Image (cartoon, grey):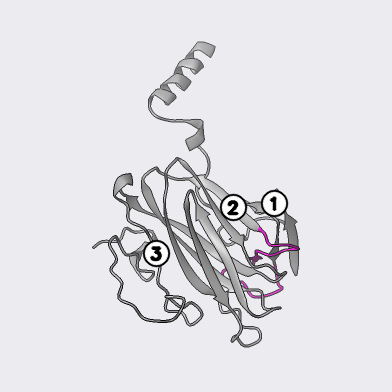
Amino acid sequence: MKKLIAVFVSLLFCLGFSTAAMTDPFQNGSFEEGPDSVDPFLTLSEGDTSITGWRVSDGSIDLIGNYWAASDGDRSIDLNGDVPGAISQEFDTEPGFVYHVLFDMAGNPDSTGLKVLVISANSDTAEYEFDNSSLPPGDMGWTEMSFVFQASDYLTTLEFASITPDAWGPALDNVRVIPIGPFPLDSMHPTGAVHAYPNLLWPPNNKKVDVKIKGYVLDEMSMSRDGNPIRS
């Protein structure tokens, strides 16, 4: 019997399977699964894994219950707890596949001003800003953001980190990861995003310039939101 098990395991590896590729798909993007009681909020420190699928990977964060209105469901995240923090999730990916990450961003309303976070996956990183200075009281102003990365391995770690220095950080909710499709690793073009939201100006100096872009375009209103491939 032991010999049969050994042969079966050897066969799996010969077929291209590995234990590294056998983990979990992306999960719990709205942070609903986790500690039983979080109202009005719960501060979690580096190393904490009580939010299902997620790990506090730096500093501390606040898991928000009824302290403010979430974008999706009942819970959201303030990426600044006692100090600026970060959360990450490791999940299954297919090498060479491009993934579209959608997430909702706002800012802790207890302090108005610019809130900044950095998202990273593998070597792909991007910085996002949210300014809640002009929002009326009680309006979180949740705004959908977009990020694209290409997987280089069977496991990818997606991380959201605050680089806002005070105690009132960027708010995060409704994270979705959508596989777009395979692209040759040596033919990828740089990715970017242009937003028309009032609090996100591009270019930063608000001057219009002619730009030529070579690559592919992900339309946030396209079918990619439903997990279907974009057709050109």
Residue that numbered label 2 is attached to:
88
State the image quarter where residue 83 is shown: bottom right
Other-residue count near label 1 (Cα within 10 Å), few / some / many at <14 / 14–19 / ≥20:
some
Q: Is residue 176 magenta?
A: no
Picture residue at 62% right of the left edge, 74% below the top = 107
Label 3 – label 1 distance at C-alpha: 33 Å
The C terminus: image quadrant: bottom left
Q: Is residue 71 magenta?
A: yes
**Label 3 SS:** loop
Q: Disc 3 or 1, which lies upstream in sequence? A: 1
- What amino acid does circle 1 point to? Ser
- What amino acid does circle 2 point to? Ser
Image check: 2 left or right of 55? left
Residue at the farthest left position: 232
> What's the magenta region?
65-85
Other-residue count near label 3 (Cα within 10 Å), few / some / many at <14 / 14–19 / ≥20:
some
Picture residue at 38% right of the left edge, 60% below the top = 191
Q: Nearer the viewer, mark 1 or mark 2?
A: 2
Q: Position of residue 14 (x, y in %)?
A: 39, 23
Residue that numbered label 1 is attached to:
50
Other-residue count near label 2 (Cα within 10 Å), few / some / many at <14 / 14–19 / ≥20:
many
Label 2 – label 3 distance at C-alpha: 22 Å
- What amino acid does circle 3 point to? Gly
Residue 203 against residue 124 in the figure, above or below: below
| For the residues bearing labels 1 and 2, Cβ distance under 8 angstroms | no
Residue that numbered label 3 is attached to:
192
Q: Disc 2 or 3, which lies upstream in sequence? A: 2
Is residue 184 visible in the rendered image? The answer is: no
**Label 1 SS:** loop
Picture residue at 67% right of the left edge, 55% below the top = 34
Label 1 – label 2 distance at C-alpha: 12 Å
Viewer-proximal residue, 227 or 177? 177
